[in-house]
Amino acid sequence: MDTIKQYVQTHKDRFINELIDILKIPSVSADSAYAQDVIDMANAVKESLLRAGCNVVELCETPGYPIVFGEKIIDPNLPTVLVYGHYDVQPPDPIELWDSPPFEPVIKTTEIHPEGAIFARGACDDKGQMYMHVKAFEYMIQTNTLPCNVKFMIEGEEEVGSKSLSWFVERNQDKLANDVILISDTGMISNQQPSITTGLRGLSYVEVEVTGPNRDLHSGLYGGAVANPINVLAKMIASLHDENNHITIPGFYDKVEELSAAERAEMAKRPYSEDAYKKALDIAEVYGEAGYATNERNSIRPTLDVNGIWGGYTGEGAKTVIASKAYAKISMRLVPHQDWEEITELFAQHFESIAPAGVKVKVTPHHGGQGYVTPIDSIGYQAANKAYTETFGVPAIPVRSGGSIPIVALFEKELKSKTILMGFGLDSDAIHSPNEHYGIFNYLKGIETIPLFYKYFVELSR
Amino acid sequence: MDTIKQYVQTHKDRFINELIDILKIPSVSADSAYAQDVIDMANAVKESLLRAGCNVVELCETPGYPIVFGEKIIDPNLPTVLVYGHYDVQPPDPIELWDSPPFEPVIKTTEIHPEGAIFARGACDDKGQMYMHVKAFEYMIQTNTLPCNVKFMIEGEEEVGSKSLSWFVERNQDKLANDVILISDTGMISNQQPSITTGLRGLSYVEVEVTGPNRDLHSGLYGGAVANPINVLAKMIASLHDENNHITIPGFYDKVEELSAAERAEMAKRPYSEDAYKKALDIAEVYGEAGYATNERNSIRPTLDVNGIWGGYTGEGAKTVIASKAYAKISMRLVPHQDWEEITELFAQHFESIAPAGVKVKVTPHHGGQGYVTPIDSIGYQAANKAYTETFGVPAIPVRSGGSIPIVALFEKELKSKTILMGFGLDSDAIHSPNEHYGIFNYLKGIETIPLFYKYFVELSR
């Protein structure tokens, strides 16, 4: 199957330029100011699938942004691979920390990417990884090597909770019927050591509002006599972790799966350097739940992080004010068996219960999703591992990721099929951060590896 | 001296319109975007003093905004009153909470102000109260009843710490020589019960920055494994108060003056309704240091309040990010004998000492000032009390205020004279808040009362 290598070599400049074109579209789903750009992006994906060889492509209407659905059915008796990806991206802020504009892609080399990387919001998450599948599909069509049926489902609300996707999947089980779901929206250990994500954390994302006095007050005339919503919010947030960094919400850990010593020993084999980790982040010390290693804290353990906080005077200079309101966005990463809706409810009950009498508290759930674990003895996992082994020269290592792709659990529930997470990104790609980028090596390697997954999945399915 | 009543009646519409004109100038000293407006306001004050009858008025250059100095010397052998005020105002935000634009003054009646109040940023703090002195001076000139010499010193940086004023006062002791300093920048108990502020709290205002990882991180991939600067900042802020709402900074209370039971009993006589207080602020409970009443917590006790906090994603929707940095603006109100520079140092040392190893902390002092207490047996206090008694029909009650006018302590140190705080504002005037206003009654009553202070001060000085 060397021809795929040749095909990539022949077309790589076009592959890169096509990706750069869609990276210029600021499809930020969280901010309604970008609504038209999100729609433009959906149409760009639709066009790319038609060009690549789908015989049917539609923009499926939903309560929110449309879902791009495309398919190529070559034989109803052959297996069907459903490719999922998303065309929306995270907001680019803080803009001022980008070395180049987030929606003006540039290629620069880095220590980890000597062949160069494309810097832009969405380069890795998920436009670059999603587009690898479009180009791998193009290759199989052009060389007449597509061994099975393919369906594409590319959504536009992954970064805001995939509400419309859930709505769509629940109503289209037949349309989406498949034998395996293939997603590239995760990372691997390094460009020398591929890995397959076998576990994902669930998510509960809420916004809290603390209201004290009915108006902003002069901190001299009222300071010390009324509850200051910012001080109170800080106290409430601080109380959500104990001195061991355990989360204090009653019932929070009740359903958390405790891994066996053997499983933890297996995880510990994953290559990891705490010094390199600290150096990369410029931190003097790691920080987290007592009794667990860094690679456990960010994968098999649930967490609670404040993602944003604001209140009072945040402008230049000084203002001696006691704000009427303070706000925070708080997300909890959950592990398998924790139900995100139950955890959201536990959080809301607890947060309201710890508010002092001097303030009012409002908790608004944003979105959430369940965690997921995929078995490594499945045909899909075996096929992916054989594909990586062939293109990287070493087998892939199974890894539990700390990230969340809530719809993976939904797919299993509604479509009754397993998901294989063939991610080609790196932790250093700065997804969700300024200067997000995706290695040219990773992009092209992904395009090379994906057709092999199809080949081995069909072989192993016989 | 009924003629002052008549004069005010005759000219009150002009007095109100002149005040409205200067309230239209957005002289916000904290925000450099308003720099030209602050200068325009300085010139407007200069013009008003010339029109009122000063024979010398200058804009004195400083390292910052100019100080308006004006004087009328009628006889070097007579006493000299130095009037201090400020022409800068607090930032207007949050703008969206104003019922009318902050720099488009409107007159509306309220329950407390049946004769109407002027709504605008600076209406009470301090343009309205400062301008009473200009109009009272105009009256004494027009009726040839000015009984002594007058000097005006109106600054433009009171809301940002009066740095340039300190610089100016230290270099101009002779120019500013006086027998008493008169300031209207405080409040009184009610329009039926005048009061004179005899104590002011000091202030230390700092900004803190907590830095975790060197970039924003994906909260799924890193959540639980690195110190989140926002969670850490919340924990650090929460730890600054113990369960009794005592401030935990070592040494913070060492120099705090403990009032005697007798003094506290005297304070407790001040008319006060906790129900009315809670109702006015729409809070279910007051909140503060254990062992002290509300009127003590906001006057004779030091406090620590967060005036602003920000970090991470604060836009629409959700962003699963761990921010690299989190910030807070924190101010401490101090009582007499606490040295603001010492407290600032104690805060910085403590705040840096409680930072966990996973973050870096930076503390930047903004500004500060000492507390102040004025004796009620001074000629100045007696003159003020006689003036209030004559115009209000009841004697003024001495009150310790929770607010800060840092330069009062500076005046005593550099100019060796006592300050009399003849305030005509009300707590309900919402200074530093949206919908700041100043009662027409209070404005005109102040103009009526001030000339009586001059009269009695000169009589009692003989």
Image: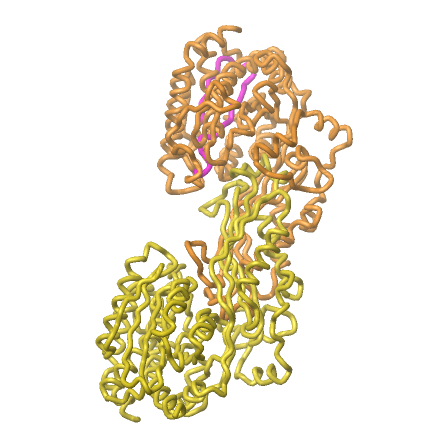
Chain colours: A orange, B yellow
Note whether residue A330 is visible.
no
Q: Is residue A304 magenta?
A: no
Q: Whole-percent x and y of residue B366?
A: 47, 58
Q: Residue furthest top?
A: A2
Q: How many marks?
A: 0
Q: Give percent across and percent down for residue A188.
A: 58, 24
The magenta-colored residue range is A69-92
User: Is residue B206 visible in the rendered structure shown here?
Assistant: yes
Residue A301 as seen in the image, left or right of residue B194: right
The correct choice, above or below, for A49 with respect to B250 in the image is above
Q: Position of residue A244 (x, y in %)?
A: 71, 46
The answer to which of A293 and B77 lies nearer the viewer is B77
Left or right: B262, with A92 as reference point:
right
Taking the image as shown, residue A364 lies to the left or right of residue B93, namely: right
Instruction: Residue at 50% x, 36% y: name it.
Output: A432
Where residue B149 sits, quadrant-wise, is bottom left
- A74 drawn magenta: yes
The vertical placement of A191 against A211, above or below, is above
Quadrant position of residue B141: bottom left
| Position of residue A100 measured from the top left corner of the image (x, y, whole percent) | 40, 32
In the rendered image, which quarter contains the C terminus of chain A? Answer: top right
Nearest the camera: B363 or A304? B363
* Residue under the point 59% across and 26% down: A419
Looking at this view, is B301 or B94 the one in front?
Answer: B301
